[in-house]
Image: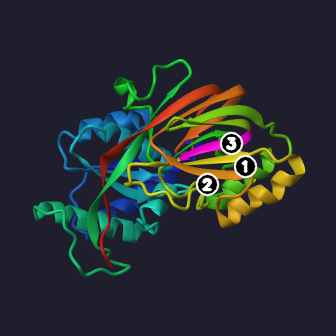
């Protein structure tokens, strides 16, 4: 198990982490899950640890936020190892999109049932399930691979899949700025943290001219943001891509036009609280490849972690069913 809570980067007192480790140990032992807990200092180290652990274990679990889950899943790309998710971050959007319990005791129970499922030699879920003892199954989900302006095209850049991937969302423009602002808010969690990032950016963010090409179809104009979604949620539960399915082999691209400073307030609040939907100012499109070019440098994030503060170009390509995740079965 790779343990790295989202507050590790925020210099949280070590005793708080030790208490959480002790609680994890108790829950894992109570559920009969053999385990070893590794505590990386950085997200990059988490990916290295996951790749090393995958050679010795059929399951590697990520205990942390979306950034930790992203890093651990990157270490498992190209392996037969299954990913377990114990969501203890501030947003937990990957777990939310996969319907993995966000209560730690229930998430550990799901992991335990996944362990027993694999031990039995089958990946078919049992029928009996409850909130406290959720049925497990093995979900096959896609990974998005991306390249930035100074890298080769994502479609052929297999050497960088280890650290240039996402399994939930890739955001460009206003979305990236909000992720940056939210990452600096240590005392808010979930949607409120993202909302704080939105409020910081709302009036002063400058939209930019973008050229967006999705499966060969090109859109040009002045956009606030472009979000490439593999999962339906970001920002602590915001329904940014309601139709997105992490295992359907398709991205859901969300393009939000610039509407002017005053008009963007109700538009973005509607997205925040009701989700994105097709309208004159929002375009949704399913696709397998995306290329975006901006007329000026903007910020970008992958699974909530800022990847660049001055990006002008990126491309992203879907890699179908690249990761096996222990998820809920049929209730």
- When the figure is inspected, residue 328 is found, relative to residue 15, above or below; the finding is below
Q: What residue is at 30 percent from the left and 63 percent from the top?
A: 111
Can residue 112 be seen here? The reply is: no
- When the figure is inspected, residue 25 is found, relative to residue 30, above or below; the finding is above
Q: What residue is at 19 percent from the left and 67 percent from the top?
A: 124
Q: Which residue is mark 3?
A: 225
Q: What residue is at 69 percent from the left and 52 percent from the top?
A: 282
Q: Position of residue 323 (x, y in %)?
A: 31, 47
Question: Majority secondary structure of the magenta segment?
Answer: strand
Residue 192 part of the magenta segment = no
* Depth order, front residue of 281/31: 281
Query: From mark 3 to mark 2, how far is it between C-alphas?
Result: 14 Å
Label located before the other in sequence (3 or 2): 3
Q: Magenta residues?
A: 222-228
Q: Which residue is mark 1?
A: 197
Label located before the other in sequence (1 or 3): 1
Label 2: how many Cα within 10 Å (few below 14, some 14–19, many 20+)? many
């Amino acid at each position: 198990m790779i343990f790295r809570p989202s507050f590790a980067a925020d210099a949280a007192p070590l005793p708080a982490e030790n208490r959480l480790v002790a609680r994890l140990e108790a829950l894992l032992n109570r559920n009969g899950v053999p385990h070893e807990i590794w505590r990386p200092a950085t997200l990059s180290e988490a990916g290295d640890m996951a790749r090393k652990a995958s050679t010795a274990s059929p399951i590697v679990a990520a205990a942390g936020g979306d950034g930790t889950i992203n890093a651990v899943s990157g270490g498992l790309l190209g392996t037969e190892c299954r990913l377990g998710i114990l969501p203890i971050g501030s947003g937990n959007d990957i777990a939310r999109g996969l319907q993995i319990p966000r209560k730690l005791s229930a998430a550990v129970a799901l992991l335990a049932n996944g362990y027993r499922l694999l031990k039995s030699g089958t990946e078919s879920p049992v029928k009996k399930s409850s909130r406290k003892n959720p049925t497990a199954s093995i979900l096959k989900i896609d990974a998005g691979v991306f390249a930035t302006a100074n890298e080769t095209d994502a479609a052929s850049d297999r050497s960088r899949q280890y650290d240039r991937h996402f399994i939930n969302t890739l955001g460009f423009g206003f979305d990236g700025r909000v992720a940056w602002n939210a990452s600096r808010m240590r005392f808010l969690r979930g949607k409120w943290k993202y909302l704080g990032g939105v409020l910081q950016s709302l009036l002063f963010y400058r939209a930019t001219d973008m050229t967006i090409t999705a499966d060969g179809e090109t859109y040009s104009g002045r956009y606030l943001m472009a979000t490439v979604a593999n999962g339906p949620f970001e920002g602590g539960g915001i329904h940014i891509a309601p139709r997105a399915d992490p295992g359907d082999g398709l991205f859901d691209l969300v393009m939000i036009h610039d509407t002017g400073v005053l008009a963007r307030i109700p538009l973005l609040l509607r997205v925040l609280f009701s989700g994105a939907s097709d309208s004159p100012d929002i375009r949704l499109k399913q696709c397998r490849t995306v290329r975006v070019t901006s007329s000026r440098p903007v910020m970008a994030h992958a699974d909530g972690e800022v990847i660049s503060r001055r990006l002008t170009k990126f491309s992203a390509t879907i890699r179908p069913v690249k990761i096996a995740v222990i998820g809920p079965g049929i209730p």
